[in-house]
Amino acid sequence: MPKSASLAILAQIGHARIWAFDFGDSFPLGLSDEVFSRRFEDISMGAYIIQKDRLISFHGEKCTYLDQYLNHYSTRVKLNSRHQRGSIILELKNVRAVGLFYGDKEIVGADKSFNVKLIVTLNKFGVSTITYWVNVNSRDVVETSFMLRQPDKIRSKFEIDFIGFSGNLSFRDLALFIAMLVLLRVYPHQYPKLNVVNILSQNLETVETLFRRMCLLIPSHYAVLTEPDSYPVFYLEPDLTTERVTRVIESLGREIRAVFTGDLNWKHKKMQVVRNHLAASSVATRESAPWFVDSDGALLLLSSTFESDRHWGRVLPIFELEILMTLKHYLTKILFLLNTVPTDSSSMYELAQLKETTHLNLEEFYNVDVSSKDTTRKRMEVCKQILGIIRLLNVVEARFEIVSSRITARYQRTNARTQALLTLIFGTFGAGALSYSLSSLYFEKSFQMIIQPTSVTPMIVLDSFEMILISTLALMVIIFIVISYVLRRTL
């Protein structure tokens, strides 16, 4: 295909990134509507409380994302996915970005502005996801996608009017900033005097250090995982029919694959390798909307003949990938806890409690049908494999087995120590009882000797008494040495 045709087809790229955060293990999701509204209405346009099946619109604002979820997707998961029923979705007010730069390279001019869409999901398992969307015009979609893959290096001047902040941030900093704003509202009593806007506006701390400091105050029974996971999603919407989009994928396979994999050596891959990878990564159920998912990213192409609402087509991948990223981060969180919880005997109960709690959550979260629709359910299962969720689950299960072995070993050692101590105590008392018995026998015989004297002299009787005492003490010492040895071998 001529180069000009390629540029005409791939003229604009849409980008979303899903961030998954650990927000502790005691999310207060059971708030009344009044309290919930009071906490979040300053930063949100609306919220959908899935468990109550209720859409709350703050200030009567139009919630395009939540409307799409409510009208097209919620019925798929409402009856099946307990994960979703335990979630709250927030559609935040738009953030305005001015200019877009990768280092010194200008992607969007410094005099041009665009909106950044932000969605937050709070999950009852203590995992929150934050997703942002941007659309970028580009004459080289592959190169632009490579730059967008590095959120710590992509910067813009963000004007967050709803909290009165304006400043230059990377897109990673933006995600952490939004996470802090949500934390302030989820756990207001943990940060009573913390003014995030002032701290960042005056450059008193970096976004990274302030976020990590806030994580230390998150109420949780266990350590909080401070490093978020993230996953990039890309969109291409060529003004082409389904048939032409199919031909584009065949002829520009290397470029298409490069966008969702981030492979820097994409130009040198054999076409057969590219075709095989595209086939293995395809999770689309419609020819009009080719959709590729890889461990390093996803790509959705919407043809001009897409049968449904185009906005619905854009947000569909986010609905499903957000669930998967929540599950993946929860597994990462469990693995982190299993590797960091101390395994000394004093934490045996803590280990057992962690195992029981996380196992129950995993059974509830993982072993459910995410959707009642068969095509969605099959796609989600394929994506679990591609994203490494099944492999991660196996690692967590193996780690659970190790923890179970440690719990059992600790219990056995503690039990053996208890038995040894009891043996020492009762053995000592037993030796004392023996001494008492022998002494009683001696005095009884001595008394008889006084009444009925014999040829045995008192000195000989006294020597016998001393022998009894010495033997008894020796026996007690031997018992103590033996028990001490057993304790050393047991513990």
Image: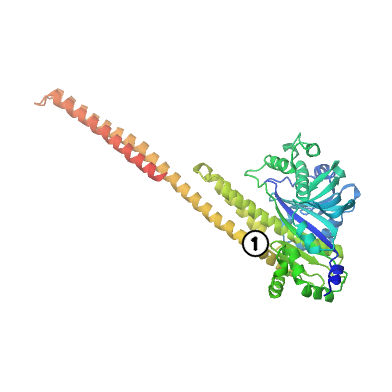
Q: Is residue 220 left or right of residue 304?
A: left
Q: Is residue 252 visible?
A: yes
- Image quadrant in which the C terminus is located: top left
How many labels, in total?
Answer: 1
Residue 258: image quadrant is: bottom right
Q: Is residue 372 visible?
A: no
Which residue lies under the disc numbered 1? 388
Q: Position of residue 316 (x, y in %)?
A: 79, 62
Q: Residues within 10 Å of mark 1 (few under 14, many from 20)?
A: some
Q: Is residue 290 above or below residue 160?
A: below
**Residue toward you, 194 or 100:** 100
Q: Residue furthest left?
A: 455
Q: Position of residue 249 (x, y in %)?
A: 78, 72
Identify the residue at image location x=82%, y=59%: 69
Residue 260: image quadrant is: bottom right
Q: Position of residue 292 (x, y in %)?
A: 74, 67
The three-letter code of the residue at mark 1 reads: Gly
* Mark 1 residue element: loop
**Residue toward you, 306 or 369:** 306
**Residue toward you, 105 or 430:** 105
Color theme of the render: rainbow
Q: Position of residue 433 (x, y in %)?
A: 30, 33
